[in-house]
Amino acid sequence: MTKTDLHTHTTASDGSLSPSELTALAAQVGLTCIAITDHDTVKGLRAIKALSQPALEIIPGIELSTTFEGRTVHVLGYHIDPGDRALNAFINDRQSRRRLRAVKILDRLRALGIDISPDELPSGSAVGRPHIGSILVKRGICVSISDAFERFLSKGAPAYVPPLSLDAREAISIIHDAHGAAVLAHLNQIGTMEQSGAVCEALHRSGLDGVECYYSTYDDKWNKFCLSLAAAYGLAATGGSDFHGSRKPDIKLGELYVPDSVLAPLRQRAQRYK
Ligand code: AMP
Ligand code: ZN
Ligand code: FE
Ligand code: FE
């Protein structure tokens, strides 16, 4: 029995396990293939050869936060070349801008009477709101990261600062230029089925390669809906948990997995950009 999870995060972005801890846990829970898809970084992939365990395949990936027609849309890249120069230049720029955004969030929190120094942000990771959520929990100001999002960090909350601007079509090009396949992530976070279906249709025309059809927070209807989009547009159907370790405590590694039959179509799509 093969078990694949194509959506995981490490300490290179906002996951709580290091790449070696993640791969060890993946092998322990019986996964046979994982993709590491950190936000805006390939740092977790650098040690990939050293980390590879005989029974575990690791697919190099990335997750880019984008906007499309006013909506927040996450695009996953698979089988990217982590050494690609243009990709690394893009990532370095994004990481400095992520830090500036995090500092802006801290400024907003300070105006609310919560004083967190930028020195408390992780220095070697692609910094994001979950890191700030962790600090708020550690300080006893919030009871959980979701509580921190609800009260301070989500859209509409008082310390919200929007994500960096990047058009979803541009993200697809960046992934293709880095020799990878571009996949639309967690459609249930984009909007209603009608809205996310329209986004998928438009991005399909801009070179999208796949749709995340299995996901921790999908119900049966979302799963079937995404499978129908993949079939309608001839896209690869992928799936993953979005494991973040303790930063998303409800998601346990090994609970959501897909059969390795999803791997060949995804690899074939990526092959187009080699
Ligand atoms: P950022 O990169 O700073 O925009 O943060 C995005 C990360 O925050 C992603 O991993 C999301 O899954 C996570 N996130 C977004 N909303 C929430 C929430 N309400 N509770 C917990 N995590 C969230
Ligand atoms: Zn994340
Ligand atoms: Fe995401
Ligand atoms: Fe993710």
Image: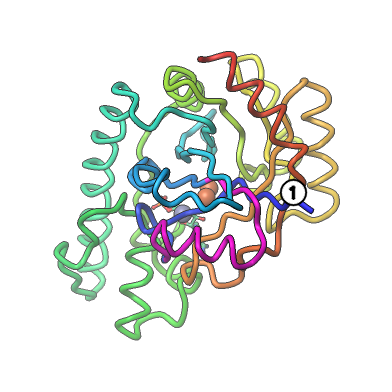
Secondary structure, mark 1, is: loop
Would residue 7 appear left or right of 196 to someone viewing this image?
left
Q: Is residue 143 above or below residue 12?
A: below
Residue at 37% across, 40% down: 42
- Which of 236 and 103 lies nearest the eye of the viewer? 236
The magenta stretch spans residue 30: yes
Q: Is residue 120 above or below residue 41?
A: below
Where residue 205 appears, as percent x and y from the top left, is 65, 14
Where residue 131 appears, as percent x and y from the top left, is 34, 63
Q: Is mark 1 within 8 Å of ligand 4?
A: no
Residue at 70% across, 23% down: 201
Where residue 68 appears, as percent x and y from the top left, is 53, 29
Q: Find the magenta span and give its range.
A: 17-35
Q: Which residue is mark 1?
A: 258
Quarter-of-image position of residue 114: bottom left
Q: What amino acid is found at the position of numbered circle 1 in the picture?
A: Val
- Furthest residue toward front: 54
Would residue 230 appear left or right of 19 to someone viewing this image?
right
Where residue 190 appears, as percent x and y from the top left, is 62, 42
The magenta stretch spans residue 92: no
Q: How is the image coloured?
A: rainbow
